[in-house]
Image (spheres, rainbow, N blue to C red):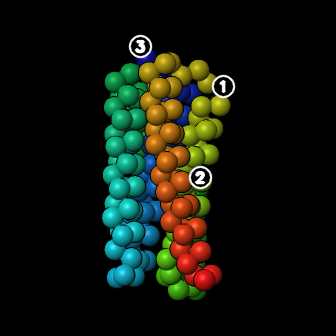
């Protein structure tokens, strides 16, 4: 069974958003202060999650005679450039880093939700994979948001 071209495109978009996520968390790790060791571990988990997501997507694409795109998206490149500019002008504080990560998590969620609502019929195995990854990404998003909110609450006391 050969993947329909538009299905391959949708799945490759998800490969790219996972590559964006990996690059974003790698960048965020470089912005951390020595005291934020807990975030380093969390960011490593997010990188591992995206690597696993990407590998599963690439495997599905290639198993069905599609060609996987292993690049990052234009939006991801813009996001990372924005993070670099922002870090030049602001302190690399925990709240700013987490807010940037939450911004990236929002983008990842939108990409997955868009893939599922695109009107392109994914076969059940692809749909199940995308839905499973989306559920996992929602948990990650919520964890980042909780970290940001908790830090903000501590700062306002």
Residue beneath the point at 58% across and 86% down = 89
- Name the residue tied to disc 3: 1
**Place of residue 99 in the rendered image (x, y in percent of width and height, measured from the top left):** 57, 68
Which mark sits nearer the N-terminus, 1 or 2? 2
User: Residue 154, located in which quarter of the rendered image?
Assistant: bottom right
Depicted 54 relative to depicted 103: above or below: above
Determine the residue located farthest toward the front in the rendered image: 157
Q: Is residue 16 visible?
A: no
The number of callouts visible is 3
> What is the number of the mark on residue 157?
none
Asked whether 126 or 147 is in front, the reply is 147
Mark 3 falls on what kind of element? loop
Query: Counting other residues with Cα less than 10 Å from the Cα at mark 2, is it few (<14), some (14-19), or many (20 or more)?
Result: some
Whole-number angstrom distance, CA of label 3 to CA of label 1: 20 Å
Whole-number angstrom distance, CA of label 2 to CA of label 3: 31 Å
Depicted 132 relative to depicted 29: above or below: above
- Name the residue tied to disc 2: 107
Which mark sits nearer the N-terminus, 2 or 3? 3
Residue beneath the point at 61% across and 38% down = 113
- Name the residue tied to disc 1: 119
Residues under numbered marks 2 and 3 in contact, where contact means CB atoms less than 8 Å apart: no
Taking the image as shown, residue 6 lies to the left or right of residue 140, namely: right
Depicted 56 relative to depicted 80: above or below: above
Residue beneath the point at 40% across and 55% down = 46
**Place of residue 31 in the rendered image (x, y in percent of width and height, measured from the top left):** 43, 77
Query: Counting other residues with Cα less than 10 Å from the Cα at mark 1, is it few (<14), some (14-19), or many (20 or more)?
Result: few
Q: Quadrant of the N terminus?
A: top left
**Place of residue 63 in the rendered image (x, y in percent of width and height, measured from the top left):** 34, 24
Of tags 3 and 1, which is closer to the observer? 1
């Amino acid at each position: 069974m050969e993947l329909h071209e538009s299905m391959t495109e949708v799945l490759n978009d998800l490969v790219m958003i996972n590559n964006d996520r990996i690059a974003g968390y790698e960048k965020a790790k470089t912005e951390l202060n020595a005291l934020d060791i807990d975030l380093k571990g969390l960011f490593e988990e997010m990188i591992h999650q995206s690597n696993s997501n990407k590998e599963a997507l690439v495997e599905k694409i290639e198993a069905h005679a599609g060609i996987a795109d292993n690049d990052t998206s234009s939006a991801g490149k813009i996001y990372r450039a924005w993070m670099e500019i922002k870090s030049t002008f602001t302190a690399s504080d925990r709240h700013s880093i987490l807010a940037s990560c939450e911004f990236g998590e929002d983008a990842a969620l939108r990409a997955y939700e868009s893939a599922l609502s695109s009107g392109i019929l994914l076969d059940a195995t692809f749909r199940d994979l995308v839905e499973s990854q989306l559920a996992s990404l929602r948990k990650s998003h919520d964890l980042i948001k909780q970290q940001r909110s908790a830090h903000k609450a501590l700062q306002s006391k």
